Image (cartoon, rainbow, N blue to C red):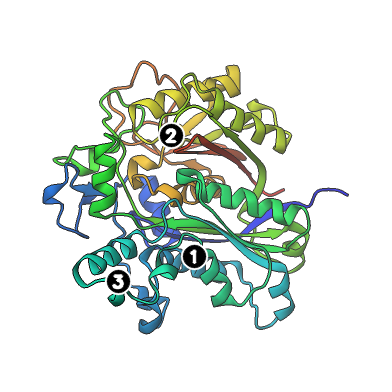
């Protein structure tokens, strides 16, 4: 049986640089950073005092007040983005209720309800176990974003959660595409969100020496591929894509934002936090995605890098791109949108896949800002500091996570 094609018919985003798709995209093209001083807790005791927070998010736009209080912030952010994507898709489940049995959701989260976890620990220590909220477990488990989507829209198809650290929402998109390809569903909600700007998480990453401590210059702190980078900037938010079987989308006259062409995974098999030196593991994911898409490396014009702004990741990813693309690596335009958004952990891959689709739509790729002193070991074209108009029909997005999880997605112009 011929493999079914998967297109994207809906987009939604809530990020540190915008609370919807277009404001996020406008900020990325303008090179506008979403990093600033932490406001969600008193950061006077942590080495890092900056983060990429979602600004002015009002959960009451998407929920009744009673419902929003029952949900952790990461679920609120996911459902907010999912609601946008549903509206954008034009799918109306009331007029085609039979679709509910052919529709599902896969959502990625690296950590889940960390805010709820911290609050519950405070309650436990100060008031004892008998005073814990009865909704404590549903608020903190990482699968609840996918579960709440199914509950909210009452669909019954494949629903799952990917928990692969910073690769989680990229895995969610790839896995959801595979569900449609093999005929197990016709429409899938896919993406992820994270909300981990907390003293516990910031302190833990500081202990691992992973975060930037450039507190004096928040907007310049995330600087992928720059020689003076000193760690990533923790952020929150996420994005959701509505994936749909192509023939169904065409039949209903849907707006098609692009197509999922390839999905590749690999594992470094090396270290709990560090990438395998030399980039072999990451290169295998890129090569697998190219093979899945049946593309030669020369047919990809743009790459949205994982590009975290950590010393180890950026040089390893550069080496991986060279391994996978060979001589074509020199002609790739490479962006790291994390230079503006910071690192959304489990939500990052979905935001970056969305940016790839918009680059194809508008024929312009976002910049890597704060790239002023290039690292000699990072010697490719990273689209420094200004967006670039160019012909883009095919783009690749990398997402790599602690534990050695590597994911590459290839997105293309629908033809």
Between disc 1 and disc 2, whose residue precedes?
1
Residue 39 at x, y percent in the picture: 19, 58
Q: Nearer the viewer, residue 168 or 116?
A: 116
Nearer the camera: disc 1 or disc 2: 2
Crowd class of label 1 (few under 14; some 14 to 19; many from 20; radius 10 Å): many
At x 31%, y 74%, the residue is 132
Q: Dot 2: few (<14), some (14–19), or many (≥20) neighbours within 10 Å?
A: few
What is the CA distance from the residue labelled 1 to the residue labelled 2? Answer: 26 Å
Q: Is residue 116 above or below residue 24?
A: below
Does residue 204 appear left or right of residue 363 in this picture? Answer: left
Residue 181 visible at all:
yes
Disc 1: which residue: 145
Taking depth in this image into account, of 45 and 294 the one nearest to the observer is 45
Q: Secondary structure at mark 3?
A: helix
Residue at which label 3 appears: 129
Mark 1 and mark 2 residues within 8 Å of each other at the beta carbon: no
Residue at 38% in and 42% down: 338
Upstream in the sequence, badge 3 or badge 1? 3
**Label 1's element?**
helix
Name the residue rendered at 31%, 26% in the picture: 226
Residue at the extreme right of the image, as rendered: 1
Q: Position of residue 158 (x, y in %)?
A: 67, 63
Q: CA distance from mark 3 to mark 1?
A: 26 Å
Distance, label 2 to label 3, CA atoms, is 33 Å
Q: Viewer-nearest of labels 3 and 1?
A: 3
Tell me if residue 241 comes above or below residue 130 in the rendering: above
Residue 34 vertical position relative to residue 14 in the rendered view, above or below: above
Query: Which residue is label 2 attached to?
Result: 272
């Amino acid at each position: 049986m011929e493999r079914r094609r998967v297109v994207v018919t809906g987009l939604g985003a809530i990020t540190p640089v915008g609370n919807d798709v277009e404001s996020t995209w406008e900020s990325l093209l303008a090179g506008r950073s979403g990093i600033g001083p932490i406001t969600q807790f008193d950061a006077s005791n942590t080495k890092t005092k900056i983060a990429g927070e979602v600004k002015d998010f009002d959960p009451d736009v998407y929920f009744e007040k009673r419902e929003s209080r029952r949900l952790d912030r990461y679920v609120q952010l996911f459902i907010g983005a999912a609601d946008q994507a549903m509206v954008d898709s034009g799918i109306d489940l009331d007029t085609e209720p039979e679709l509910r049995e052919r529709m599902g959701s896969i959502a990625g989260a690296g950590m889940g309800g960390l805010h709820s976890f911290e609050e519950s620990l405070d309650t436990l220590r100060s008031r004892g176990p008998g005073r814990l909220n009865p909704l404590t477990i549903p608020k903190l488990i990482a699968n609840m974003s996918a579960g709440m989507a199914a509950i909210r829209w009452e669909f019954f198809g494949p629903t799952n959660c990917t928990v692969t650290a910073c690769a989680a929402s990229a895995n969610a998109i790839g896995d959801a595409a595979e569900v449609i390809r093999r005929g197990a569903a016709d429409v899938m909600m896919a993406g992820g969100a994270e909300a981990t700007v907390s003293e516990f998480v910031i302190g833990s990453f500081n202990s691992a020496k992973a975060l930037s401590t450039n507190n004096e210059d928040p907007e310049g702190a995330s600087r992928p591929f720059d020689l003076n980078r000193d760690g990533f900037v923790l952020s929150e938010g996420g994005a959701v894509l509505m994936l749909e079987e192509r023939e169904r989308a065409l039949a209903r006259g849907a707006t098609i934002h692009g197509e999922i062409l390839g999905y590749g995974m690999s594992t470094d098999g090396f270290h709990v936090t560090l990438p395998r030196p030399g980039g072999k593991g990451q290169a295998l994911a890129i090569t697998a995605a190219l093979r899945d898409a049946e593309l030669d490396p020369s047919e990809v014009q743009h790459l949205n890098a994982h590009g975290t702004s950590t010393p180890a990741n950026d040089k390893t990813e550069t080496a991986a791109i060279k391994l996978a693309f060979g001589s074509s690596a020199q002609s790739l335009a490479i962006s790291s949108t994390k230079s503006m958004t910071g690192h959304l952990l489990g939500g990052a891959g979905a935001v970056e896949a969305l940016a790839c689709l918009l680059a194809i739509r508008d024929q312009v790729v976002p910049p890597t800002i704060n790239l002023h002193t290039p690292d000699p070991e990072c010697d490719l074209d990273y689209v420094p500091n200004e967006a670039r108009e160019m012909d883009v029909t095919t783009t690749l997005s990398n997402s790599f996570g602690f534990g050695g999880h590597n994911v590459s997605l290839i997105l293309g112009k629908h033809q």
